[in-house]
Amino acid sequence: MRVSRAQAEANREAVINAASRLFREHGFDGIGLKDLMKGAGLTQGGFYKQFKSKDDLAAQASRRAMEHAIRRWSAVAAVGADPFEAVIGLYLSTGHREEKSDGCPLVALGSDAARQSEEVRVPFQDGIEAHLEILDELMPAAESPKTHRKAMAILSLMVGAVTLSRILKDEETSRHFLDVAADEVRRIAASPEKA
């Protein structure tokens, strides 16, 4: 049975969305094409009509995941009285720690992405730059030309803290990593810039 162009595009979007979640949950090499397609409610047979390769899908799914993460930060910043604090509260929370398939792709796939092709790494590069821009804008005293350095330190600290907190089995220690990171993020943001 022939599929209309509109249905083919809807199927393609469903595969990208499913892959975005499933890659974050299982890693790039932890799930095969059959299960990726099944996650979208489709069969493996149509994969190569929609994508050049698994890397092509991984790149598109990574871009989708990074865009989702950026939209989340922007949305929470838009409704909070203190946008910077709202982003910290969202990111360094036990709720985010538990969001394996919908959480930050930098946490879920960062080390995996470093071993992938350039095609797959480009969306991460773009996403990191977008995260840094948001932090630059939201950080207290953002008019300082040195805030980009602070944003780099803060993003590194936040991603690392969530990563470590996901590894730990002890709930108290896991939560403590998030709390300590939040305190340090606030300290870095409030510290005066050095020339």
Image (tube, rainbow, N blue to C red):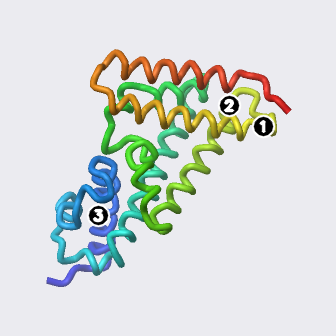
Q: Residues within 10 Å of mark 2 (few under 14, many from 20)?
A: many
Image position, residue 114 (x, y; %): 46, 56
At 33% from the left and 32% from the top, the residue drawn is 167
Mark 1 or 3 closer to N-term?
3
Tag 2 near tag 1, CB within 8 Å? no
Q: CA distance from mark 3 to mark 2?
A: 36 Å
Query: Residue 146, which numbered label?
Result: 1
Q: CA distance from mark 2 to mark 1?
A: 11 Å
Where does the C terminus fall, quadrant-wise? top right
Give the residue number, with chain letter if any, for mark 3. 15
**Vertical arrangement, residue 31 with respect to residue 189, above or below:** below
State the SS at label 3: helix
What amino acid is found at the position of numbered circle 2 in the picture?
Met
At 34% from the left and 75% from the top, the residue drawn is 53
What amino acid is found at the position of numbered circle 1 in the picture?
Lys
Q: Nearer the viewer, mark 1 or mark 3?
A: 1
Q: Residue furthest bottom?
A: 2
